[in-house]
Image (cartoon, rainbow, N blue to C red):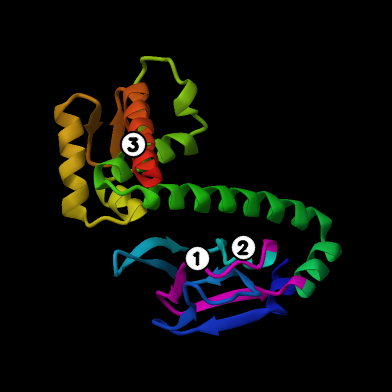
C-alpha cells in the first residue's frame, strides 16, 4: 500500500498550515511521517484539540459531506501526508478492496471520535468538559456509561491529567482543579500514569444533568 500512497504524497515543514478552520475543503489526508497539530478557535482563543501521528487520518469530512473545515491543522514537525480528493479516493478504493474496508472502519471511528470531542467542547462549564472527557475515555474501553451498573472501578491506563486537559481544551491548572475535587469526593482516584473511575454512574448522571440544564438554558 505504501507505493499507492506515494503517488499522492505531499510534504510540509514545521509550522506550515495544512488547512484552516471554516475554509471549504475537498481533500483528506493520511499521515505517513511526522506529527500534525489540530487546533480550534474557542472563546476567541486557539486551543489544541489533538496531536496526530502516523497512520492517522484527518480532514475526512470533506470527502464525506463536503463540510467546511471544523478545525485548523498545522505541521508540528516535518510532515509527509498522502492527500486524496474524491476522484482519486475512489480510484484507491477500487484498486484495493481489502484496504478500502480497513479505511472505512478507520473513517467511521474518526467521525465518531470527532463528533464526541465536539460534544465535549460544546459544554459551557469547564467542570462538565472534564467529566465528559472521562466518560469518553471510558467509552473508548468499550464500556457504555449509560448502562453500566457494576461497582468495580474502571482504570484508564496511561492517562494523565495533562491528557484530559488536552482532550477537553483546557489549560492544565484548570483541569487539575476539577480532578482534585472529584478525587477528594471519592469519585476518582489517580496515580502517576492512570485515572481510576470509582463511580461511573454518578459521573454519568452529573454530565447528563449539566447537558440537560445547558440545553434548557439555550431554549430560553
Question: Residue 49: image x %, image y %?
Answer: 39, 60
Residue that label 2 marks: 61
The residue shown at (53%, 64%) is 54
Disc on the earlier residue, 1 or 2: 2
Query: How far is the residue under mark 1 from the one under mark 2?
Result: 9 Å
Q: Residues within 10 Å of mark 3 (few under 14, many from 20)?
A: few
The residue shown at (58%, 52%) is 111
The residue shown at (60%, 74%) is 25
Give the camera-side residue of 214 and 3: 214
Give the camera-side residue of 112 and 43: 43
Disc on the earlier residue, 3 or 2: 2
For the record, the magenta segment spans 64-86
Residue 178 is left or right of residue 60, and the answer is left
Residue that label 1 marks: 70
Question: Residue 189: image x %, image y %?
Answer: 23, 30
Disc on the earlier residue, 3 or 1: 1
Outermost residue on the front side: it is 220
Q: Are marks 1 and 2 in contact (CB under 8 Å)?
A: yes
Residue 15 magenta-highlighted: no
Q: Residues within 10 Å of mark 1 (few under 14, many from 20)?
A: many
| SS of the residue under disc 2 | helix
Residue 69 magenta-highlighted: yes
Residue 163 is at least partly visible in this image: yes
Query: How far is the residue under mark 3 from the one under mark 2?
Result: 30 Å
Residue that label 3 marks: 213
Amino acid at each position: 500500500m505504501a507505493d499507492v500512497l506515494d503517488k499522492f504524497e505531499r510534504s510540509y515543514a514545521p509550522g506550515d498550515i495544512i488547512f484552516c478552520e471554516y475554509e471549504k475543503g475537498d481533500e483528506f489526508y493520511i499521515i505517513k511521517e511526522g506529527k500534525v497539530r489540530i487546533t480550534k478557535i474557542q472563546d476567541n482563543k486557539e486551543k489544541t484539540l489533538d496531536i496526530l501521528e502516523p497512520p492517522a487520518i484527518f480532514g475526512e469530512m470533506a470527502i464525506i459531506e463536503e463540510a467546511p473545515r471544523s478545525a485548523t491543522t498545522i505541521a508540528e514537525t516535518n510532515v509527509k501526508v498522502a492527500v486524496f480528493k474524491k476522484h482519486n479516493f475512489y480510484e484507491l478504493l477500487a484498486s484495493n478492496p481489502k484496504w478500502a474496508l480497513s479505511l472505512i472502519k478507520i473513517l467511521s471511528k474518526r467521525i465518531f471520535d470527532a463528533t464526541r470531542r465536539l460534544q465535549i467542547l460544546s459544554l459551557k462549564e469547564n467542570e462538565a468538559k472534564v467529566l465528559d472527557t472521562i466518560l469518553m475515555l471510558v467509552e473508548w474501553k468499550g464500556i457504555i456509561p449509560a448502562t453500566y451498573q457494576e461497582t468495580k472501578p474502571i482504570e484508564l491506563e496511561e492517562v494523565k491529567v495533562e491528557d484530559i486537559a488536552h482532550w477537553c481544551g483546557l489549560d492544565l491548572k484548570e483541569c487539575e482543579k476539577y480532578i482534585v475535587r472529584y478525587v477528594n469526593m471519592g469519585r476518582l482516584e489517580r496515580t502517576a500514569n492512570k485515572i481510576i473511575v470509582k463511580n461511573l454512574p454518578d459521573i454519568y448522571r452529573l454530565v447528563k444533568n449539566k447537558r440537560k440544564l445547558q440545553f434548557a438554558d439555550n431554549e430560553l
